[in-house]
Every structure is written in structure tokens, then in C-alpha cells.
Amino acid sequence: MNEQIMAPKKGLMTPFNIGAAIIVVAGIIITILRFTLGLGAVTNLSDYYPWGIWIGFDLMVGVALAAGGYVTSSACYLFGMKRYHAAVRPAILTGFLGYFFVVVSLIYDLGRPWRLPYPFLLGWGTTSMLFEVAFCVALYLTVLFLEFSPVALEWLGLKKARNLVHKLTILLTILGVVLSTLHQSSLGALFIPAPSKLHPLWYSEYIAVFFFVSSIVAGLSMVIFEGAISHKALHHRMGKEYLENHDDLTLGFAKAASMVLAGYFTIKWVGVAAGNHWDLLATGYGLWFLVEMFGFIALPSVLYAVGVREKKFGVIKIAAVISVLGIIVNRLNVSIICFNWYLPSADRYVPSWMEVVISLFMVTLIMLVFRFIANRMPLFDTHPDYRDNH
Amino acid sequence: MSLSRRSFLFGLGAAGTGLAVGKTASASTGKEFTGYPDSYGVLHDISRCVGCRQCEGACNTVNDLDAPEKPFTDTSVLDTKRRTGQESFTVVNRFEPKGKRPHFAKIQCNHCQEPACASVCFVRAFKKSPEGPVVYNPDICVGCRYCMVACPFDVPAYEYDKAFSPRVRKCTMCAPRIAEGKLPGCVEACPKEALVFGKRDDLLALAKERIKKHPGRYIDHVYGEKEMGGTAWLYISDVPFEEVGMRTDLGSKSAPALTSGALGVVPMVVGLWPVFLTGMYGMTKRREKVAAQDQKVAVTAAVQEAEAKAAQELEVCRAKAKTDQEKALAKADKEREAAIAKALEEAATKEVPPETDETPHGEEA
Ligand code: SF4
Ligand code: SF4
Ligand code: SF4
């Protein structure tokens, strides 16, 4: 098994490793503070801003960016883009890790995290959008785990179990799409009961649709973006099929992303028109809205289109980065920046440095686990024993 | 002061029994809900409030809250605008509407008829009780703080400093006191009768009566009658409500009514998506199968054609080879005969020509 060669020994003192080590140590210390002294000791959360970046970034952005899993697997298995097959595994893994760490962040953020199962055990708060989010995320995490398990089972050499799970692929994919549709949109719908608190340019009765559509953009862009990074860092781990189809996949996803972004751009305007909020565009928040619309939605849509037509992969990569930033901007706008926008600046929320470190801690952990798995398990490559079996 | 002037109750004992029966309410099923009949509320007449903060003090006492830095008699705290907090379930703020005397307005939980906080809680820790108060159960609260995000009046506060048992904190409408037949602490303490406790329906009638009785004094609006689906706490004022810090852009749709549309989509997604996706998968499969079949047919045809062609070519080759062979044989025969003849001739003449030199010359030319 020539493909199973371990990562080349580069030594442990790479800049990435040093940075990661510092963040991990700081993260552990703050974790201890958080769970012994309470939320107040480490966060800037207030009664006006009960949700900070652990929700606005870790949860909202985390879930959106983890959409690559369902986007890729449905493109490959349901919409007949078989040639993207090689991209499914890394996308599922990032999806799984993304969701896993969303739950970890939630444990940091909840006042009494050990009661996390209560909604399912004690009070079925079915009128709550959060109940739907929690329910779907819990189920989807299981689905992602199962979808990813063949990789681990191949690694462990458990053929029977692997083939059994493999038979469920289509069922799991469909389940994954249904659950993703529900909770991606519900994250936006969390704000539907609070029209008075979110700025009218961002509040819309269509906000659930916005969140769902933009999650597709996030998924596509993340697959392109991660592909580009992995390609550099983990080239030695990539199988022939992955490498051969990489460019093809990038072009296909970039084309899709360009179109979905264009659609997203359009329905966002429909939202403004439905609320008849044109006058607000002339305000400071209106300007910020225009920046989001043109800088982070229209621009990457055009760049993607140009990149595809001219086959310029550099342009596509830039478009992917801008799209991902656009998702971050949008989720932070909805949950923090344009939330309680009418308050005087003294009452506004700015995250504490410790909240930021914990968010970085989560991102770092995701990258470390991803690297660990990619260097050991058949992620960018099918295990030689199963090559023809898909 | 008589109890009946600050309460619109004509039998508090009856109220007690009513509470004891107390069925639990779920004000959150998304159905049309116009409030419990005979539920209680409080009417706050902003025109009467003098900002003495006695309600704040009483609330602090009856709820056993921590003592604030400055005593409740200190009115300098009115210089900054405050909101409710974990140790202050109610606060009074001062406002200076243009060209008018300073006004004061008390805020606390409004005990909505269809509370946002209750509808968004995923463990149902908040409940609208049939008696009126919106009550909170700290024993099941997970601490997600969605209730705080959703409350349109920015009321609930959180105990961020507690690591192990943080709670959401807010006014209870003094539900325990009502059950004992007592008035809410703040209502009892108000020296100006700016607060009146009673059945919400009666209070609504009282509010409208006051507005009608003093033409030109009050703004013609009972705040809380319709706001966010209606609240148990009602307000009347002699200055526009936005000038005393109250939001007038809330609309009359309650939080659960707003959410029900989005929730209604869920069964659609669950029902239709799998059908559509399976269809998609089926079509893809079929397309692949058809493509595979077409390919197979094409391949067979090509192979047959190629085979036929090859056979034909082979035939041609064979024929050609045969004639070639015959020709070659004939040629060889001729050559042999010629050679023999030549040899015979040579033998006869015994002359040898310089052949080796001539051949390269011929090739060069
Ligand atoms: S005012 Fe806020 S906390 Fe009070 S019942 Fe209404 S939504 Fe709940
Ligand atoms: S913080 Fe507690 S009461 Fe509020 S929504 Fe969450 S679980 Fe419910
Ligand atoms: S009703 Fe009771 S808890 Fe509410 S503000 Fe008045 S005294 Fe405080």
C-alpha cells in the first residue's frame, strides 16, 4: 500500500503548530475559568446581548460553513455528478467536525450545559425554532457520523461494517439534505419572533429562505476553499481520482456558486421590496447593507463566473474566500451587529478577548483533528480494497 | 388608602382559589388565542407617576433581591436611563418630553397574553398562567437565553456571574402574593395610585373610561391592549408613548403568530423533499442506466462493424497475398529460367562483368 505513506516528517516546530499550541493552551485556561467562574467572568454578554460571538460566529457561521457536507454528497449521489465523488469524503469530514464543534461551543455558551438533553426529555418546546434547530442538529450530527464512518472503518479494516454502512449512502444523503434544509433555514427563523429587535433591512419574513440559500453558497465555497488549502498541504495524501477531478470539481462548484449567489442577491432585494424599506438604504446601516449586497454577494458571483469562463483558478479561489467572508459578515450582522441596532453605543456588545480566543480555539481544534485524520485515514482516496465499489 | 382604590378586585379571596385550581397554560400552540378570561393585569397611569421609586423598593423587598448601591430614596439614579436587571425586576425612568414637565415611566415584565419568551423556550420553562402572570421555572431552564433575545420589551435578565445555577430573572407579577390574596408589591407601595391591579378586562375598561372622562388629557391609546398580541400590563399616558421610552413600532402580531408561518413549512419540507430527492436520484440512476445501455449498444455495433471490416480486409489481404504469391512464383520461375539461360550463355562466353561497382552507382542516381 504505497498510498498509505505517512506525512513527510517536517518537524513539529512549524509556525502553524506553534500558533496552534499557544491558542490551545490559552483556550484550556479560559475553558477552566468559564466553567468555574461562570459566563460573566469571561464574556461581555449582557442582558441586551444574551448572544455573543459563541452563538453569532461559532454556531451561526459554523453551521453555515459546514454545509459543504450535504451540498457535495447530494450533488454527487442525488444530482448525478458522480465525477465529484472524490470530494465527498473531505466535505463530509469537515461537515462532521464543524457540527461537532458547534455543539462543543454550545456547551460553553449555555448557562447550564449539562441540561442540554432537557428539551428532548422534559419539555418538548415544539413552538420554538430553537427546538427545531437542536433536534435537526442532533440528528444530522448522527447522519454525518454514519456518512463518515466508512472512512474510519476502512482504516480499521472492518470490511463487513463498512459495506453495510455503504449500502445506506443514498438514504443517509436524502436524510442529510432534509435535516440540513430544516435547520439551516431555522437558524434564520430564530429571529422571526423578534421583528422589533433586528434591523428591518436584515429582518424579513423570508429570512429562513435567505439562510438556506446562503448555506448552499457557503457549502460550495467552503469545498472550493478547503480543496485549495488541502491541495497544498496534503497533496501527498491525495489519490489519483481526487487529483484528476479536482479542477473539474472546482469549475463545476464555482459555476453553481455563481448562480446561487445571483439568486441570493435577487431574493435579498425581494425582501427589501416586500418590507418597503428603500428609504433605510440612505442611512448608515443602509450603507453597510449595500456593502454586504455588492461586496460580499454580487462581487463573488461575478468573480466566480469570470473564473469559470476564463478557467482562472486563482480568481475562483478569491471568489470563494470573499463568499466565505460574506457568510461570516451576514451571520454576524443578523445575530449581533444589526441586532438591537437602536441601542446607544454604550449598551452595544463587543466580544471580550477571551470570547475571541475560545472561538479561535474551536477553529484550531477543527484544523488539528482534520489534519490528524487526513494524514491517517483514506480521506482523499478510496482504500485500495474498495476502489471499484461505489 | 383603601385596597379597592388601587385594586380593581372585589374579592381577593376568590382570586386565591382561582390560582389554586390553576391549570397550566400553553400560550404557544400557534392557534388563535385572545387571552385567558378573568386573568389579572396592572394598569400604569404614566400621567400620575412621580418617580418616587417606592415601587422599586417594594419589589426589591418582596422578591428578596440584593440591596442596590444607592438607596431607593435617592432619585439621582434617575439621571441615567436604566433597564431591568437580575436584581431589579422593575425600574422607573425619567423622561423630559419637549415643552412638558418631566415624566416618569415604570418598566417590568408586561406579562404578554402570548409571550414571546414562552413561545421560543425550547424546554417550556416559561408559561402564561391562566391568572395572568408569565411564570418561569428555573428547574428546567437550560440557559440558552433565547427568551431574552425574543422579548420585545427587553425584560428578562440573566445571572451571568453564577457558574452553576444561573437563572433568568424577571418580574413575576408577584404571583405568589396574588395567590395569598395580596396585591403585587409595587402596586401596594405606589403612593399616587399610578398602578392599579385587577382583572385585565376591567382595567381595559377603566383605562378607556379615564381617557374618555378627561378629554385632551390622555393620548387616545391603551398601550398593551394590542401590542405584540396584547399584554397584561396596560399603560395610559398624557404624552406620546415614544417620548417616555416605549416602542410604538411593535405591531399587534404576537411572537407565536409570527413564527407559526415558518413552523408550518416544516411538514412541507419533511414531506416533499425526500420525494423530490428520491425522484432526482431515480432520474439520475435512470439516465445513467440509459446512457450505459446506449453505450453498450453503440459498443456492440462498433465491435461488429470493426469485426466485419477486419474480416473483409483479411479476405482482401488473403486474396492479394495469393495473387502476389502466384505472381512471385511465376516471376521466380521466369527469373530462374533466365538465370539458367544466362549462366549457360556465360559459361559459353567465359567473360565476367564488374557487377560490384555498378550497383552503388545506380542507387546514388
Ligand atoms: S414582556 Fe417579555 S418577558 Fe415579559 S412576558 Fe412579555 S415576552 Fe415574556
Ligand atoms: S434561557 Fe431558559 S427560559 Fe430562556 S429560552 Fe432558554 S431554556 Fe427557556
Ligand atoms: S409585580 Fe411584583 S415582581 Fe413585578 S414589578 Fe411589581 S413588585 Fe416587582
Image (spheres, rainbow, N blue to C red):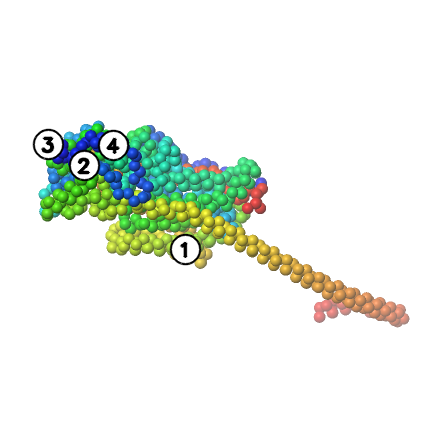
Q: Amino acid at mark 2?
A: Gly
Labels 3, 1: front one: 3
Q: Residue B1, labelled with which disc? A: 3
Labels 3, 4: front one: 4
Q: Give me the C-alpha separation between circle 3 and circle 2.
A: 16 Å
Q: Residue A259, labelled with which disc? A: 1
Which image quadrant for residue B112? top left
Q: Which residue is mark 4?
A: B19
Earlier-in-chain disc, 3 versus 4: 3
| Chain name for mark 1 | A
Q: Quadrant of the C terminus of chain B?
A: bottom right
Q: Amino acid at mark 1?
A: Met
Residue B194: in sight, yes or no? yes
| Residue A348, image x, y percentages | 25, 42
Q: Residue B198, labelled with which disc? A: 2
A370 vs B352: above or below: above
Which image quadrant for residue B162? top left
- Looking at the rendered structure, whether the residues under marks 3 and 4 are on a common chain is answered as yes
What is the secondary structure assignment of the residue under circle 2? strand
What is the secondary structure assignment of the residue under circle 1? helix
Residue shown at the point (49%, 42%) measured from the top left? A147
Q: Give me the C-alpha separation between circle 1 and circle 4.
A: 59 Å
Q: Amino acid at mark 4?
A: Leu
What is the secondary structure assignment of the residue under circle 4? helix
